[in-house]
Image (cartoon, helix red, strand yellow):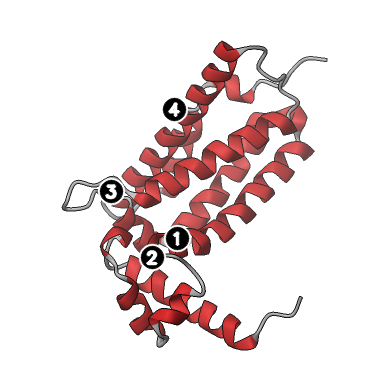
Amino acid sequence: MTTDPRFARSADALARAVLELAAETPIEDIAVTDIARRAGVTRATFYNHANGPEELLARVLGAELDQVRQEFLDSVSSHLDDVEGAWRETAGLLMDHIDSHADVYRTGLSQTEAGRGSMLALLLANHIEGTLERYRQVIGAPEPKDDAERARARIAAAYLSHGVVGGYRAFLTGPEPRDRDLALDVIVGATPREWFATPTP
């Protein structure tokens, strides 16, 4: 299906606008009018693309995060004899994505003045949880046999994903110069060893 060029242009303008504004102000505090004005489009045009600022930002960043996920899973599937090495080597992909939007994530991962939680923290954590679920499939991990095992798997994935997000938050909000390699070593090193164990035949 051919995309309407006008729709594509407004989509690009809105993507740029939401990234620019989210680098200055938490997305929770940005209005549709702010984004539409920055993008040079009407509110009606905005609503042709998203239901609100948070959805728009999630869509823009989510497209990149999906690419990061696929590259990670492809690397793991090609290195099942050294899952930890593949994990460590490709953990930098998410760091690259976050670093490329450092101001957006630095602003968005900080708690808002109203004390609300961060939409970006949840977006990242959900992305990582989804990646871990796919990762288990790639390495051939057995399906949980009962409710207790399913609960354990969900809790373990949530624990790890939110911890990783906390690590990236600490990295982004730390003093300059930021040591990328140190951050990756700590984040990967703190990962429970069970995630690197592949099922024995």
- Residue at the (32%, 61%) spot, across then down: 27
Q: Earlier in the sequence, mark 1 or mark 3?
A: 1
Q: Kindly indicate whether the residue at mark 3 contacts the one at mark 2 (C-beta within 8 angstroms).
A: no
Compared to residue 170, the image places residue 35 above or below, namely below
Q: Is residue 15 visible?
A: no
Where is residue 183, by image quadrant?
Answer: top left
Residue 53 coordinates in the image, percent (x, y): 38, 65
Q: Earlier in the sequence, mark 3 or mark 4?
A: 4
Q: Kindly indicate whether the residue at mark 3 contacts the one at mark 1 (C-beta within 8 angstroms).
A: no
Q: Is residue 130 visible?
A: yes
Q: Which residue is mark 3?
A: 174
Q: Earlier in the sequence, mark 2 or mark 3?
A: 2
- Residue at the (41%, 44%) spot, across then down: 122
Toward the viewer: 137 or 3? 3
Toward the viewer: 65 or 198? 65
Q: Which residue is mark 2?
A: 53
